[in-house]
């Protein structure tokens, strides 16, 4: 039998995937870039600044995942605990004209979908980390290539941006946010 | 740019080169490359390099050697990174008399001799003191090990009959040494040992000199390390005391020598730096001749010159050579590969050239996109940061750069102007959308005046999405129009229609379809698709999806804009949550608030900058811009330190 608590559980899962999966991506990406950075610094310690900038780029996906998780928690009301979610489900039920149980289920599934979008898109940070690692090497040898390498590295992030965008559109489209 | 040729009498060469260097507008090129035909080769020969260049190079090396020595003894203070950016010390300027040619070379020689004479003696004494300190310190280090061994070191000597050695050996070998040596010398030896640590023993050996070779060989094999105690007397502890005293006196010698050299450095350094710069300028002046060709009495040079400077240079050349010269200028040939490019933009816009050049300097005859890049980049950054307070922070950062490093460094100034400009754009967009540290002013301070003026990004997400996509379409179509114009001008009609024009009927067609004018819309769409299909063949499908991708790419403006607001909101929520902690709650809340917002400003500022550049490089430039022009580097005086 479905009740409101199923919705809460799903919403929590959604927020968890959002942060967790993108943290895996960012963590691995930053790690790959950092290893290359350490190599560059071993040869020339003055390359620390360059290495740090490139290493920071794959962190963005983790931030998007964090943002996605917080937006899901705000949208579904679970930031305010079980009662917060219940209140949000009641409002939603009034808004679309259904039972609170149904509304809770919709909210929970929307949260899972949104979390999957930004969370899995966050794995693009691994690819970005690989490009960043190459860029650190390139810029260490040829400082003039900084701008171009920056652009190459940002390419992977496009998909993370789209992932976040879809999460936001799901939350807005299903009236969890902005209504 | 115009191509410039000058032919003049050789006797005017030096004054002419000097004048052209002062004018600093001609970029010299190698005449030899353009005059390769055999006819020219009969008439002209390559201009030899001036023998004085070698002399100057040697002088510059001597100057460097002395200056390096001065720097190693009394280093000049240098600004660290932050000081350099925000409050740099004014660059050093040295008065220098205006001398050149042989006079300069003679003066430089005299200066080198004079300084060397003054520096040589203290330098030698300093080197001696330093190496002596090194030796004594090494001795002290080894003596420290045998400090407690009671022996008069004056007795540890080698004479004709007796050889005494002292040293350190592994503890477990001490017994072995004793038996082995007795064996070699038939018992005619003395061995004393004492443990000095967990692993090592000090060993004293005395044996007849006639057996000293075998003794020292077997000692070495058993891990014995000899300690050199020649010239020392008393117990090791006494010797250490004495050595300590000697090192101290040498140290004070070294200090006084250093201060002596510092005085010398202060006296000579400016003179040396100024003359080194004058010598380098002189070398540039002579080096440029290797680009020329010559006959017995004349020489010819070739170079690039900006069109507006032509008349002034012509007048000057005729004046310097008393009219014994020919100056000719022509247009560069129509499809030039190596014409240098000199960019000119209005005062504010020119600071954004930095961003264009990061991608690639425009080629000759190519449009300079900087004037379009500047406003669009400001707009994009404003949308992506979307917060008035962050905008103020960005502006303050820009102004600090301008007031600090921007006074002396042109690239810091460029960044200062760019940061200030994009900061102002962010303030404007933040006010329009009601972002002040996220929802801080609205939710926590309850200031209703600061509500969004046009829309609230967190509420009207759909409107925001349509807005950024429309901005993207306008931006892309601007690029397409420019590309179309360029291609038509270059008479590359196939590219003009296949790369750019087909999108115009397609886009209008889609707009008409959306407005329910099905027939006209479908017709226009079809025209566009057929056009690209004919020109690009079966792969035209990817042109369509590619353009769709370009348009959707501008959605990043929305995502990053919302990310700034969303993370700011999260920071606010977090600091409100920790405020509930008893006693230290308010401090914690303030800490989370300040650090959180600085972090958000840093990460999203970087994101906004990088993605703003990316939208230009990848989506916008792609439509019309190639870049890859070479820089205009005029032959000029490179003056950094000296004043005229």
Image (cartoon, helix red, strand yellow):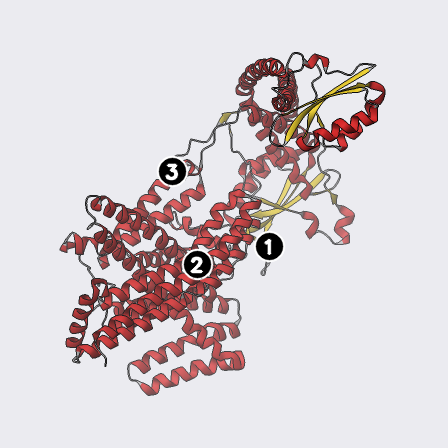
In the rendered image, residue A17, in percent from the top left (x then y), is placed at 35, 67
The residue nearer to you, when weighing B125 against B55, is B125
Question: In terms of secondary structure, where does tag 3 sit?
Answer: helix
The mark tally for this picture is 3
Question: In terms of secondary structure, where does tag 1 sit?
Answer: loop
Checking the image for residue B226, the label placed there is none
Taking B631 as reference, is B441 left or right? left
- Measured in 3D between alpha carbons, the distance from the residue under mark 2 to the one under mark 3, in whole angstroms, is 34 Å
Checking the image for residue B338, the label placed there is 1
Taking B194 as reference, is B574 left or right? left
Which residue lies at the image location 40% right of the left edge and 43% below the top edge?
B413
Which residue lies at the image location 49% right of the left edge and 69% below the top edge?
B488
Question: In terms of secondary structure, where does tag 2 sit?
Answer: helix
Checking the image for residue A27, the label placed there is 2
Which chain does the residue under circle 1 lie in? B
Pointer 3: residues within 10 angstroms few (<14), some, or many (20+)?
many
In the rendered image, residue A51, in percent from the top left (x then y), is placed at 49, 50
In the rendered image, residue B30, in percent from the top left (x then y), is placed at 66, 47
| Whether label 2 touches label 3, CB < 8 Å | no
- Circle nearer the viewer, 1 or 2: 2
Q: Determine which residue is flagged by label 3.
A: B86
């Amino acid at each position: 039998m479905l009740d409101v608590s199923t919705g809460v559980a799903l919403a929590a899962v959604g927020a968890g995937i959002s942060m967790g999966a993108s943290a895996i991506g960012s963590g691995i990406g930053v790690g790959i870039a950092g290893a290359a950075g350490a190599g560059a610094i071993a040869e020339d310690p003055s390359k620390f600044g360059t290495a740090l900038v490139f290493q920071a780029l794959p962190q963005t996906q983790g931030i998007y995942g964090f943002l996605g998780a917080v937006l899901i928690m705000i949208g579904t009301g679970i930031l305010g605990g079980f009662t917060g979610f219940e209140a949000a489900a009641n409002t939603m039920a009034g808004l679309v004209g259904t039972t609170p149980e149904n509304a809770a289920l919709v909210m929970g599934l929307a949260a899972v979908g949104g979390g999957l979008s930004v969370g899995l898109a966050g794995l693009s940070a691994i690819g970005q980390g690989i490009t960043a690692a190459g860029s650190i090497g390139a810029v260490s040898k040829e400082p003039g290539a900084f701008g171009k390498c920056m652009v190459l590295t940002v390419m992977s992030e496009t998909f993370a941006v789209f992932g976040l965008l879809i999460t936001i559109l799901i939350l807005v489209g299903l009236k969890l946010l902005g209504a | 740019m115009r191509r410039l040729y000058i032919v003049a009498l050789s006797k005017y060469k030096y004054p002419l080169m000097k004048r052209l260097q002062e004018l600093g507008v001609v970029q010299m090129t190698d005449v030899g490359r353009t005059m390769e035909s055999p006819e020219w080769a009969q008439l002209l020969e390559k201009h030899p390099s001036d023998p004085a260049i070698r002399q100057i190079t040697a002088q510059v090396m001597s100057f460097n050697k002395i200056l390096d020595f001065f720097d190693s003894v009394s280093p000049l203070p240098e600004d660290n990174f932050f000081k350099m950016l925000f409050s740099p010390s004014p660059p050093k300027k040295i008065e220098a008399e205006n001398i050149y040619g042989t006079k300069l070379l003679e003066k430089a020689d005299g200066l080198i001799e004079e300084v060397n004479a003054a520096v040589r003696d203290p330098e030698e004494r300093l080197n001696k003191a330093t190496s002596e300190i090194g030796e004594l310190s090494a001795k002290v280090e080894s003596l420290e090990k045998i400090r407690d061994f009671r022996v008069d070191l004056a007795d540890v000597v080698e004479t004709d009959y007796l050889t005494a050695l002292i040293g350190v050996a592994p503890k477990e070998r001490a017994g072995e040494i004793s038996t082995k040596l007795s064996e070699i010398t038939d018992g005619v030896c003395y061995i004393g040992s004492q443990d000095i640590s967990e692993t090592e023993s000090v060993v004293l050996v005395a044996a007849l000199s006639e057996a000293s070779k075998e003794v020292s060989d077997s000692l070495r094999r058993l891990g014995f390390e000899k300690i050199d105690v020649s010239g020392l007397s008393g117990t090791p502890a006494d010797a250490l005391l004495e050595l300590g005293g000697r090192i101290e006196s040498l140290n004070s010698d070294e200090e006084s020598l250093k201060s002596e050299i510092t005085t010398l450095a202060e006296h000579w350094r400016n003179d040396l730096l100024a003359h080194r710069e004058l010598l380098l300028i002189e070398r540039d002046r002579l080096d440029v001749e290797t680009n020329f060709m010559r006959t017995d009495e004349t020489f010819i040079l070739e170079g690039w010159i900006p069109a507006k400077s032509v008349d002034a240079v012509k007048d000057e050349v005729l004046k310097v050579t008393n009219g014994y010269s020919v100056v000719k200028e022509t247009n560069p040939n129509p499809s030039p590969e190596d014409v240098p490019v000199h960019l000119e933009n209005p005062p504010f816009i020119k600071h954004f050239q930095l961003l264009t050049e990061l991608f690639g300097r425009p080629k000759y005859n190519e449009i300079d996109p900087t004037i379009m890049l500047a406003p669009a980049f400001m707009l994009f950054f404003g949308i992506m940061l979307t917060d008035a307070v962050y905008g103020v922070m960005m502006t303050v950062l820009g102004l600090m750069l301008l007031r600090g490093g921007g006074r002396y460094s042109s690239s810091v100034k460029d960044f200062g102007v760019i940061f200030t400009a994009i900061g102002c754009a962010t303030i404007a967009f933040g006010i329009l959308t009601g972002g002040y540290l996220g929802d801080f002013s609205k939710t926590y301070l309850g200031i209703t005046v600061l509500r969004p003026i046009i829309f609230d990004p967190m509420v009207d997400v759909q409107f925001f999405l349509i807005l950024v996509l429309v901005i993207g379409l306008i931006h892309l179509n601007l690029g397409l129009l420019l590309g179309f114009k360029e291609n038509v001008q270059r008479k590359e009609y196939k590219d003009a229609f296949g790369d750019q024009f087909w999108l115009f009927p397609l886009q209008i067609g889609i707009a008409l379809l959306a407005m329910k004018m099905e027939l006209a819309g479908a017709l226009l769409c079809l025209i566009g698709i057929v056009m690209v299909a004919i020109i690009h063949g079966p792969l035209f499908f990817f042109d369509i999806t590619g353009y769709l991708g370009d348009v959707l790419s501008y959605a990043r403006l929305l995502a990053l804009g919302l990310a700034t607001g969303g993370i700011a909101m999260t920071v606010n929520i977090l600091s409100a949550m920790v405020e509930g902690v008893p006693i230290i709650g308010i401090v914690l809340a303030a800490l989370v608030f300040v650090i959180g917002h600085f972090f958000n400003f840093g990460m999203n500022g970087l994101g906004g900058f990088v993605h703003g550049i990316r939208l230009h490089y990848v989506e916008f430039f792609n439509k019309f811009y190639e870049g890859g022009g070479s820089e205009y580097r005029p032959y000029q005086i490179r003056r950094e330190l000296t004043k005229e």
